[in-house]
Image (cartoon, rainbow, N blue to C red):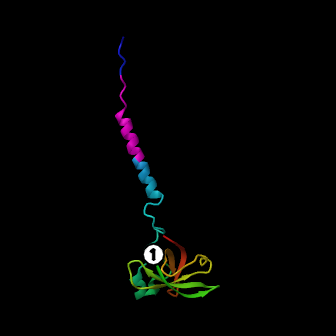
Amino acid sequence: MPRRARSTPNTRLILGLVVGGILLVAVGGYFLGGSGEPYRTSPEFPVEEYLATSSSLRGNSYRLSGAVLNSIAWSPEAGRLISVEPSGSDSPIPVVIPADLSKTNIQKGQRFHFLVEVRESGVVFATDFTKP
């Protein structure tokens, strides 16, 4: 009886599939939430520069992460004024939450990621925010 030749698996093909799978997982993780930080395309809010001269930041958008220290004021038309302690800073920043965004329950001590805009008077307005 003649012997049959044994076929060995193609090692290059297997290695290529493994490398391709690893690359696919890495690219998917990068694009579908790599760091989990929202508003990554906006620069970080410059707390010290804002406290020194808020007028130099007018018209710009920033991301701000921090804890709510207190709810200062509320108006059905204008929204809510809160004080936020930015991450990495001990200086509270006043942030206005417009009435169209104030449907979310905001309580003292909660942490949020804000997308803020410094308006012409130097007041910080939230344009969007999420809980981490």
Amino acid bearing label 1: Ser
Q: Nearer the viewer, residue 49 or 71?
A: 71
Q: Is residue 105 left or right of residue 10?
A: right
- Whole-percent x, y for residue 122 in the image: 49, 86
19 relative to 91, above or below = above
Which residue does the numbered mark 1 point to in the structure image?
A: 65
Q: Nearer the viewer, residue 45 or 67?
A: 67
| Residue 5 quadrant | top left
Q: How many marks?
A: 1
Q: Nearer the viewer, residue 63 or 61?
A: 63
- Whole-percent x, y for residue 131 in the image: 51, 71
Query: Is residue 8 inside the magenta stretch?
Result: yes
- Whole-percent x, y for residue 43 in the image: 43, 73
Residue at x-position 46% and y-position 84%: 93
Query: Is residue 97 inside the magenta stretch?
Result: no
Where does the magenta region start and end? 6-21
Check disc 1 and report its element: helix, strand or loop: strand
